[in-house]
Amino acid sequence: MENKGIDPNRLAHVIGKFKQIFDVDPVAVIRAPGRVNLIGEHTDYNGYPVLPMAIERDILIVLKPRQKPQVRIDNTLSNFGARTFFLDQPIQPFHKGDWGNYVKAGIRGILDLQKTWQGFDAMIDGSIPPASGLSSSSALVVASALALLQCNRVDLDPIDLAQRLAESEKFVGTAGGGMDQTISLNGLANHAVKITFYPLAIHPVELPDFLSIVICNSMIKAPKTEHAMIEYNRRPLECQIATRILADHFSKLFDRPVSATRLADLDPQKLHISPKAHTRICKEVLQPEIMSLDQIRTKSGFSMEKLLDEFPLLRSCVDILNQKGFPLAARVRHVYSEALRVESAVQALLDNDSRFFGQLMNESHASCRDDYEISTPEIDTLVRIARDAGALGARLTGAGFGGCTVNLVETDLVPAFTDRIWHAYYLDYLVKNRPDIDSKGLNIKDVIITTKPASGARGFTLPDS
Ligand code: GLA
């Protein structure tokens, strides 16, 4: 078999594990990559573009179809135990945080395509560090859906599938946008991909060879099922509330109904007002800087009950959210400024202007840190060290609250850059400031990942053995 970008030793290992557990030969393999987002953070669910690329780290599923409508999965890592479920019964989640829920989410996303399904046995192996902002979970969702499609010989357009899986991943609990599933399915070798939403579309942009993307793992885990999930979900919620308050204001201002589901619906271009006037109005309307729930009620004219009905995300954790208050003006500032940075970054790549691209990444980081408040001290340190070590641009990537940074580095400088980061962050900063993290046990290749843009998820049949 042509190796399709899969390391033959790894594949042989996963096949070996499959045979050991299921006692037969597998017939197919699915590969779904993780992703790193170059710029455009928390813009997707607001209806604005993102610019990620698929990475060379992935989820592999080695499988064999079964006659029965039953799925049996196992993992090469023993801490993710075996799981089983049926396709002809309603698929309920395993307990919260269970890895099998991502498999179920992928499968639920396509189940309505036909009435009866053959199940499969599968051995799953991941090379994407989990809870690190590189979308290991979406890669598993994507790979699981492709596994079921492949076993049942059903074809689905990768854009349609991405749309379905963005919805179905909500089964696991986060109110994410569609970036992760779309790039895992639609990645393209040597290209970053601008993704636009509503309607979903992809626009590849070449990444020149002289530029490298280096990912550094802060080692602060941000699992989407715990604290990070509440913190993540409050961001879309705050944007939804801001959208509602702003739409009401614009309706009064223009003396006509202005309807909006997300912030992109209130873009200055769509409203035919200048960006400057738009910024001023958003600032004025969304005062005070940190709003209480009472102030939100007054501004929106909603009763508490109506507010909870209108914004279901609020209901899940209203007390926790209310303690901190709602910095709506800052959130909106981030989203509108980040949307502009994505457009400028795409243009910078097309113009071969890597310095400007790097500058935009740096500005994006500042906005994520100060206005969207999704950074951590460790991530900020990693970003600072990276810039000192020569990165053209450095920023947090993904949902935030820990995870990884993404760095734009001239290819020739990658070895020296990697060495500087390894010493300054992992061997010095982490050792001194985070003794709870076993930095001595780290392997440089696992925490500093240089990757080319990879192609999107695919399934292949295995030759008879
Ligand atoms: C998570 C979500 C994405 C996106 C990013 C932030 O990865 O799944 O949809 O919102 O966070 O940019």
Image (cartoon, grey):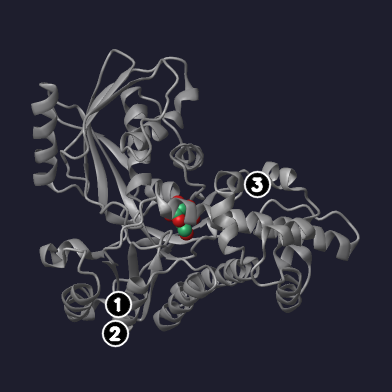
Residue 78's spot in the image, x, y percent?
A: 15, 38
The label nearer to you, 3 versus 1, is: 3
Residue 365 vertical position relative to residue 291 in the rendered view, above or below? below
Q: Identify the residue position indicated by label 2 in the image.
A: 390
Sequence-first tag of 2 and 3: 3
Quadrant of res 38: bottom left
> Which numbered marker is on residue 409?
1
Q: Residues within 10 Å of mark 2 (few under 14, many from 20)?
A: some
Q: Residue at x 55, y 48 (%)?
A: 317
Q: Residue 307: image x %, image y %?
A: 71, 47
Sooner in the amino-acid sequence: mark 2 or mark 1:
2
Q: Position of residue 392 (x, y in %)?
A: 35, 81
Depth check: give the residue in front, 299 or 391: 299
Q: CA distance from mark 2 to mark 1?
A: 7 Å
- Marks 3/1: CA distance? 42 Å
Residue, disc 3 = 311
Q: Secondary structure at mark 2?
A: loop
Under mark 3, the amino acid is: Phe
Alpha-carbon span between mark 2 and mark 3 = 44 Å
Q: Does residue 126 lie above or below 433 as drawn? A: above
Q: Is residue 48 visible?
A: no
The type of residue carrying mark 1 is: Val
The answer to whether mark 2 and mark 1 are in CB contact below 8 A is yes
Image quadrant in which the N terminus is located: top left
Q: Seen in the image, is 375 located left or right of residue 270?
A: left
Query: Would you say residue 424 is visible in this rendering?
Result: yes
